Image (spheres, helix red, strand yellow):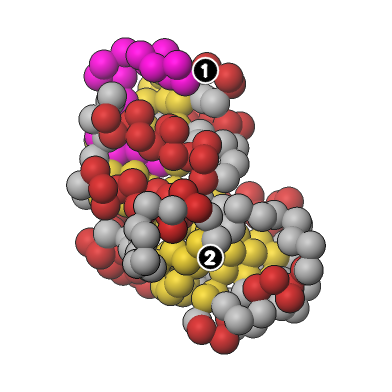
Amino acid sequence: MTPHNHAKAGDYAEAVLLPGDPLRAKWIAETFFKNPKLVNSVRNCLGYTGTWKGKPISVQASGMGQPSLSIYVHELINTYGAKTLIRVGTCGGLNAKVKVRDLVLAQGASTDSSIVKGRFGAFNYAPLADFGLLRAAAEKAEAAGMRYHAGNMLSSDIFYHANGMAGYDTLPQHGVIGVEMEAAALYTLAARLDVRALTICTMTDCLITGEEIDAEQRQTSLRDMVTIALDVAIQA
């Protein structure tokens, strides 16, 4: 047990999905898992364990932003033995070629967060996904006929940027295709603690074109994304 998690040893599978939203964690468990069991409800940051296609699998809400995710990921790895962590979330688009409902596989994660850059002195550390997980996700998306993009994601600590898109203007020029709030910290912790991690997002609104999808389209897209993440997780 930890201050943020009352699960017992063995309550989590080695493979864990990480949505930010606790209600999305509940939806994943109740929609996809066989025999889901609630293992954590501290601060209502819900965690569940069940099976998917006969293999053990867990889901744990991580909250919003890199500080919150870092707490849960640190504890999942060090206290509960997690070996494969896949963030499943949504992102904004920073490139017009990325359309709403497309999958974005975060091959790398740039960031403005001191959580990453504060640890490396003069070096600009480049947080990266596990290549095996990335390759598996790309192959499954392609086999399912889903549009996907693998590339550099921005993990920002700022949701409401004071300067709007002007705050991101140099990033699309250098191949950054989407923005979310967690991947860089996940990848940095995974590298430090020698586990595997991947971030898969559905692009729900484009900051370039203003295009966005409604709630029904979002739910359908999330279902497809979670199915791929589960299949990758249990094969890891």
Q: Amino acid at mark 1?
A: Ser
Q: Position of residue 45 (x, y in %)?
A: 54, 26
Q: Secondary structure at mark 1?
A: loop
Q: Is residue 229 visible?
A: no
The verdict on residue 2 being magenta is: yes
- In the displayed structure image, the side of residue 213 where residue 232 appears, left or right: left
Observer-nearest residue: 156 or 57? 156
Query: Which label's residue is closer to the chain start, 2 or 1?
Result: 1
For image coordinates 44% across by 39% down, the residue present is: 70
Neighbours of disc 2 within 10 Å: few (<14), some (14-19), many (20+): many
Quick check: 171 above or below 48? below
Q: Quadrant of residue 203?
A: bottom right
Q: Is residue 116 visible?
A: yes
Bounds of the magenta segment = 1-17
Q: Amino acid at mark 2?
A: Leu
Q: Position of residue 136 (x, y in %)?
A: 28, 62
The residue that label 2 is drawn on is 154
Quarter of the image that includes the N terminus: top left
Q: Position of residue 153 (x, y in %)?
A: 49, 67
Q: Position of residue 145 (x, y in %)?
A: 44, 72
The residue that label 1 is drawn on is 41
Q: Secondary structure at mark 2?
A: strand
Which residue is outermost to the bottom?
Answer: 173
